[in-house]
Image (spheres, grey):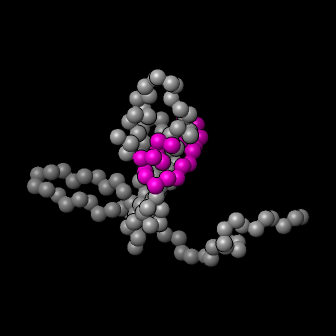
Amino acid sequence: MGKSPAPKDKRDGPPPRSRWTSFVADEPAPESAGAAVKAVRGLHEQGNPLHRLRVEHNASTMLIHLSDEDGRGWTTIAIDRATRRWAVEHDARQADTASAAYRSLYGPSPSGAENAENDELPGTT
């Protein structure tokens, strides 16, 4: 058997083992008098609130948004709920990655046609 090619990054082999952990919920916004408590929609890495995660969905698509460790960029995974096909995009802005991942998954909308679902992508308006 041949030896597998060397990793393309600076590591030699897998990273060292460490304890697995989970993202935790953001703190809920303070209640104002008479207002209902808003649902917590964001998660972040415990000890690193800049490393965030959010999941949004509609009837046909799930969008999973993951920020860079330092919060300066975003990776979005778009998943078709019926087929489980997926697409991944990375860019500086969450709205750009959401739109790009959606287009990668479903293709561009027909020229001149309005795509109501694409127009309603979270974070793109």
Residue 121 spot, x, y in % from top left: 41, 39
Outermost residue toward the top? 112
Q: Is residue 61 above or below residue 75?
A: above
Camera sees residue 84: no
Can the viewer see residue 76?
yes
Q: Quadrant of residue 117?
A: top left
- Between residues 31 and 101, which one lies in front from this camera angle? 101
Please give the name of the residue rendered at 25% of the width and 52% of the height, measured from the top-left corner: 38
Residue in the image at 38% along x and 36% along y: 120
Q: Quadrant of the C terminus?
A: top left
Q: Quadrant of residue 72?
A: bottom left
**Which residue sits at x=47%, y=42%?**
99
Indicate left or right for 1 with 50 as reference: right
Percent x, y of residue 18: 57, 76
Q: Which residues are magenta?
A: 79-100
Q: Relative to 89, is 117 above or below?
A: above
Q: Is residue 36 magenta?
A: no
Q: Position of residue 20 (x, y in %)?
A: 53, 70
Q: Residue 114 falls in which quadrant of the image?
A: top left
